[in-house]
Image (tube, rainbow, N blue to C red):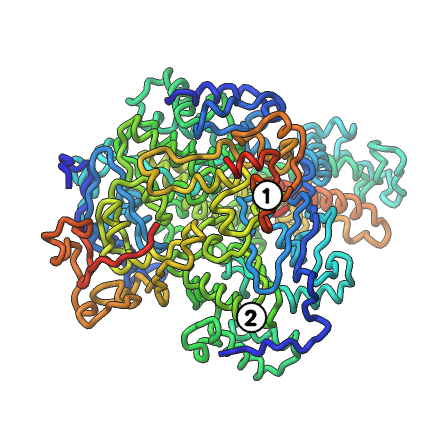
Amino acid sequence: MADRGEPILQVRNLVKHFPLTQGILFKRQVGAVKAVDDVSFELYQGETLGIVGESGCGKSTVAKLLMRLEQPTAGQILYKGEDIARLSGRALKAVRRNIQMVFQDPYTSLNPRMTVGDIIGEPFDIHPEVAPKGDRRRKVRELLDVVGLNPEYINRYPHQFSGGQRQRIGIARGLALNPEIIVCDEPVSALDVSVQAQVINLMERLQDEFELSYLFIAHDLSIVRHISDRVAVMYLGKLAEVGTDAQIYDHPTHPYTQALLSAVPQPDPAARATRERIILTGDVPSPANPPSGCRFRTRCWKAQDKCAKEVPLLAVPERYRDSDSGARHASACHFAEEKDIVHA
Amino acid sequence: MPDQAPEALKKSGALSETETLKKEAIPTAAAPATVVEAGPAPGRPRSLWSDAWHELRRRPTFLIAATIILVLFVMAAFPGWFTSVSPREADLTTNYLKEPQLTHFFSPEWLGYNQQGQSIWARMVHGTRASIIIGVAVTAIVLVFGGLVGMLAGYFGGWIDAILSRIVDVFLGIPFLLGTMVILVSFDTRTEWTVIMALAFLGWTTIARVMRGSVISVKQADYVAAARSLGAGTWRIMLRHILPNALAPVIVVAMVALGGYITAEAVLSFLGIGLTEPAISWGGDINRAQDRIRVAEHILLYPSILLSITILSFLMLGDAVRDALDPKLR
Amino acid sequence: MPIDMDKTDVTEADTPGVPLLEVRDLHVEFRTREGAAKAVNGVSYTVDAGETLAVLGESGSGKSVTAQTIMGILDTPPGRITGGEILFRGEDMLTMSEERRRTIRGDKIAMIFQDALSALNPVLSVGYQLGEMFRVHRGMSRKDAKAKAVELMDRVRIPAAKERVNDFPHQFSGGMRQRIMIAMALALEPDVIIADEPTTALDVTVQAQVMDLLAELQRDFTMGLILITHDLGVVADVADKIAVMYAGRIVESAPVEELYKRPAHPYTKGLLDSIPRLDHKGKELYAIKGLPPSLMAIPGGCAFNPRCARARDICRTEVPPLADVTEPDGTPIGGRSSACHFWKETIHG
C-alpha cells in the first residue's frame, strides 16, 4: 500500500452494545444487542473510505459513534492521536468542528421550523469563533452557492425544496465549519435515481475543493465503488474484509463479500445468462444473539467446525501473504480464497 | 466553485418557475453534467405556521368558532358594551314569570328576569368574565407547568422520566372533578383564583403526558442528531429544535382542555362549591334556576345555551387547529 | 410441490391476438386544493402470459398510480380516472359490472406490495390470512384452507412451514414476510401479478432470493408479471420488456436488451449513463440536470425538455407522440417505441 502518512482518524477495537433491559423503575439488563463488536479501521487525509453492509450490520451505529451521538461501550476513536471517545464538554465541542455528518433522510434531517439560512447558519451560532456575527449571512449565501443552490433561497423553509435540494442544504450545513472529515450515512439512498448522480458529483467536487476525508456509508455497492478509495465490508457488527476498491471488488476473498457482490442486480441484461450468482440462504441472524465463532457461518457454504469455534481475525490470509495479487488484503475468514464472480 | 455552475444557477434562480420553462433554457450543450438544480422552490418563504394559518383561514368551522370566541373575549373584557344594567341590580317588582322580550335585543328584558328580578342577559354577559378568566388562566398555568414537566421527562429520559412519570401517574389516579371538589370544599370563600389553582393543580398532567410523548418522538428526528453533532447545548436543542416541533399536539390538546376547564368551573359552581357570591358565574345561575324550571324555563335555558356554545366553540377551534397543523389527518 | 394449474374454465382461455392485460390511453389525476395533479397522462401497455413487463420510473412518474388503477385500489377521491381503458382479455374493467370486476381483481390479478409488514394484518396469523383467500374465494373449509396455506408457504420456500403457519407477521423476517406476500398473491393462481417495488425494502442478499423466487414462480405458472421499480439493475435481471415512465407518460418502451444497448429517449439514456461504471472511476458521473417536474405544472411540449440536452424549440411546443423506432434504413425494430422528437439522433448517435 502506498505511503499515506499518518491517518487522520483511527478507530481501534470499537464496541457498542445496546443493553436490553426489563422493568420500569428498576431496570435490569437481560442481554445486549451487539451492534458494533470490535471494529478497527483508519481514515487517511483526503481519502474516501466506503463502508458497505446490509441493514442491521452496524454501519450506521459506527457513524453515530464517530459523531459521539452514541457513547462507545469500549474502544478508541483517535482523531489526530486524541481519543474522542473520552472527550467531553469544551474539548469535545472543539473536535466536533472537524468532524461533520451528512444524514440519510433529507426529509427528517432539517428542522422544518427553521429557515434554510438559520439551518446553515446554526453551526456559526454554536461556534461563534468561526465567523464573526456580521459576516454570517454572507457566509451562508456563499455556502448555498457552493452546493449549487440559489443564495436567494436563504429565507425559504425546508418543505419548499425537493429531496435533492434538501440534501444539498444538509451538505452545506456539514461544510459550514470547514471540517476535515465528513461522515456520510447513506447520503443518496433516499433520492431519486436521476438526482443521485448530481449529489455524488457535488460531493466529489467538494472533496477536491476542501480536501475533505469522507467516511461513506452505503448499501449501494456501485456508488461506493465509484466514490471510495478503500472499502470495508461489514457483517453483523464486525468487519469482514477491508481493502482498496479494486481489491474488494475484483479480488474478494471473504465469502460474504463474494455473495454480496454477486447478488447486486446488474444493469446489463446481456450478462443475465452468464452470471454466476451466489444466492445466500436464510436471513441475517439477530445481533442480540449472534452465532459463535464466525458470524457469517450460519449462511456460509464453506462453514466447518472451526468456524463455529474460532473467531476469524481480520488479517491478510496466509496464502496470499507473499503474493502480489489483489487478494493480498485483510479478510476475516478462516478459508479466505478468491472466487471469480461478476461484480458491481 | 467550478466554472459554469454559478452563472447558470443565477439565471435559473432569477426566473420564476414558469418563466424558466417558457424562456430559453439554460444553454446546456456548454455545461454537461453540471450540478445546477433547475426548478426553483416556488413562491415566497412559507413557514409551517404560516401554512397552517392559511389553511385555517379557509375553514368555516375555524371562522365560526374563532368569531364566537372573539366575541366572548370582548364580552369578558367590556361587559358594559353589551348591556347597560348591572347584573346585581335586583328589582323585585319585575316578575320573573314575565315572558322574555325576544325582539328587544340586548335590552335588560331581552331574555327575561330571574327570581330576584335581575336581568338574565346582564348576568350572562357579566358571567362570561369568570368563565373566560378561569379557562384561560388554568390553560396557561397548565401549559407552562405541564409542558415543562413533559419536556424534562421526555428529553432527559432515564430516572428523571421515571420519577416524573410516576408523579404524573399519581395525579392521574385522582378523579379530576372529585379531586377539585375536595380541594374547594376546604375554602370558605372561593374567588376565581381559588378555582383556578384547584383546577390547575389536577389538570397539568394531561399536558405533561402529551408533551412528553411529543418530545420523545421529536427527539429521535435526525435534525436533533444533526444539532448535537454540531455541538449544540441542551438549551439550544430543547428550545430551538424540540420545542417548536413538539408544540403542535400540545396546543391542540390545550385548546380542547380550555373548553373542559370552563365546563368544570360551571359544574363546580352549579354544585355550589365553585365561585361563591358575589361572583357571577353561569354555573351558579343555572343552579339557582333549576327549582323554577317548570314555570320559568328561560332562567335556566339561556345561560345553558351560552355555556354550551362556548364549550363547543373551543372544541371546534381545537379540531380545526389540529387538522391545520397535521396535514396527514386531512 | 406443484399446484394444479389446469384451466378448467374454458371461456377464460387465451384468445390469439388479444393481450392478457392491456392498458389503453389511461388518464388519472388527483384533485388537490392547489389544482389537479396529472399523475397519469395517456399510458398504454400490454402484458401477455409468461411475460415480464418492467415499468421503470422515479417517484411521481405515475408508475404506481397506474398499477393502483388496474387493481382498483386507487383512492377516489382525491384520485379520478379521466380517460382510458383497462382490458383484461379484451374486456374493459373500467366499464364492466362491479361484480364481474371484483372476481377479476380478486382471482385473476393479484398485487404484491413493497411494504409487506403493513400489507399483512398484524393480529391474524399468516396461516389464517393465507387460508382466508381459499375460504372466501373458494369456499373451502377451515381445515382444508390451512392445509393449502402450508402448501403455499412451502411453495415460496418458507422453512418449517407446518410449524410456522400459526405465527404472526411480526415473527417473520423482512424477506420471509415478502415471501408470504408472494404466497398470498399466488394463492388463487392469478393470470397477472403486479409487483410494486417488491424488493426495495429488502437487503441485497435477500433481494436476490426473493427476486429469483418470483421469477421462477412466474415461469412455472406462466403468469404475466408487471414489475414496478426504479432499479435499473433489477429490471435488467428479470424483465422481458420495459416501459420507461416520466411525468405520467411512457417515454420509451423496448425489449430489455435493446433498451440497455441503445436507448432511444434522452431520459432513458441519461438514467443509464448516470449508473457508476468501472471506467468512470475518479471522473464525474453523468447527471441529468434539474429535477423531476411537479405534477401540478408539467412543462408544455415534451415534459422532459427543461432537463434535456437535445431540447429545441419543437420540444417546448409539441408533445412528442410515442412513435415506432426503426433502424436507420427504415426496418422496424420489434416492439420499440420512443416519445422523443429526436429519437433518431438519440438511438443512432
Q: Residue at x 72, y 49 (%)?
A: C81
Residue A308 location (% of width, % of height): 21, 69
Task: Look at the image and tell me whether residue B160 can be seen.
Answer: yes
Task: Please name the residue that numbered disc 2 is placed on.
Answer: C221
C246 sits to left or right of A293 = right
Residue C318 in the image, given as x and y percentages of width and height: 67, 31
Of all residues, the one furthest to the top in this rendering is A134
Name the residue type under label 2: Phe
B214 vs A131: above or below = below
Is tag 1's residue or tag 2's residue first in the polypeptide sequence?
Answer: 2
- Chain under callout 1: C
Q: Is residue A151 above or below residue A40?
A: above
Picture quadrant where residue A42 is located = top left
Identify which residue is drawn at 61% across, 68% down: C190
Classify mark 2: residues with Cα within 10 Å, few (<14), some (14-19) or many (20+). some
- Give amino acid for label 1: Thr
Determine whether the residue tagged by mark 2 lies in a helix, strand or loop.
helix
